[in-house]
Amino acid sequence: MKALIQGLVLSTVASTVGVSAQADALYQQYQAQWAAAQYQQQGDAREAALASLSAKVRQDVQQHPDDLALRTWAGIIVGSYAGAKGGIGALSLAKEAKADYEAVIARDPSTLQGSALTSLGVLYYKVPGWPLGFGDDKQAEFMLKRGLNLNPEGIDSNYFYADYLASKGDNDTARRYLQKALAAPDRPGRALADSGRREEIRALQKKLAE
């Protein structure tokens, strides 16, 4: 189960529209804290850091219910916590993240260049299907393509679509999207997240070359 639920993480862009400067700074703070937990912690320490972040971001979402960027990041953090936790207990966290993404998509799917769409697509192909979970490959591909349409040059949108394709055995197409992901421009203020994602891209490239 842990292998199936792992990897439910997405590092989004660092800009959005229609959010106050204070709220913008708030979600950017979570971006930095998530990157530190995800890429600088291991094992139990990572799980504990993400558990703490999940509790904090949920409180802030309650205080800022109209901040769609923050709600997107709530889903990312909780989904990452699910990946770190693993097992049956992670499914309830994955469902919580799914609800966050769906709430954002219902109001404005273009938030953070479609990050909720891509993130929801990741959940759909990482989470087990019925009867254990809500995993659905068709929904995964649909959401990932919608996210890619909104962010065609993004490191995450291309990487996760490539990862999905590789999981379906379409390695040739996956390699092309991995190359696009690796060529994505650096994101301001996101050096740690970009570095960590590029390591994941290279790891998948190596795996597909074996």
Image: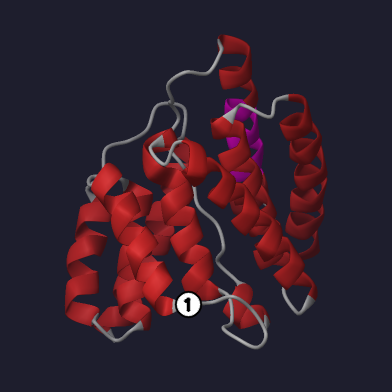
Query: Which contiguous range is marked in magenta?
Result: 27-36
- Check if residue 31 falls in the magenta segment: yes
Q: Residue furthest front?
A: 106
113 in relation to 142, above or below: above
Q: Nearest the camera: 35 or 140?
A: 140
* Magenta residues, dominant SS class: helix
- Percent x, y for residue 175? 21, 70
Q: Is residue 148 left or right of residue 83?
A: left
Residue at (57%, 63%) from the top-left corner? Answer: 8
Q: Is residue 64 left or right of residue 157?
A: right
Q: Is residue 71 left or right of residue 202?
A: right
Q: Nearest the camera: 207 or 81?
A: 81
Judged from the image, the secondary structure of the residue bearing numbered disc 1 is loop
- Percent x, y for residue 99? 64, 54
- Percent x, y for residue 185? 27, 38
- Percent x, y for residue 155? 33, 49
Q: Is residue 83 left or right of residue 166?
A: right
Quarter residue 53 falls in = top right
Q: Nearest the camera: 110 or 156?
A: 110
- Check if residue 133 falls in the magenta segment: no
Q: Which residue is mark 1?
A: 136
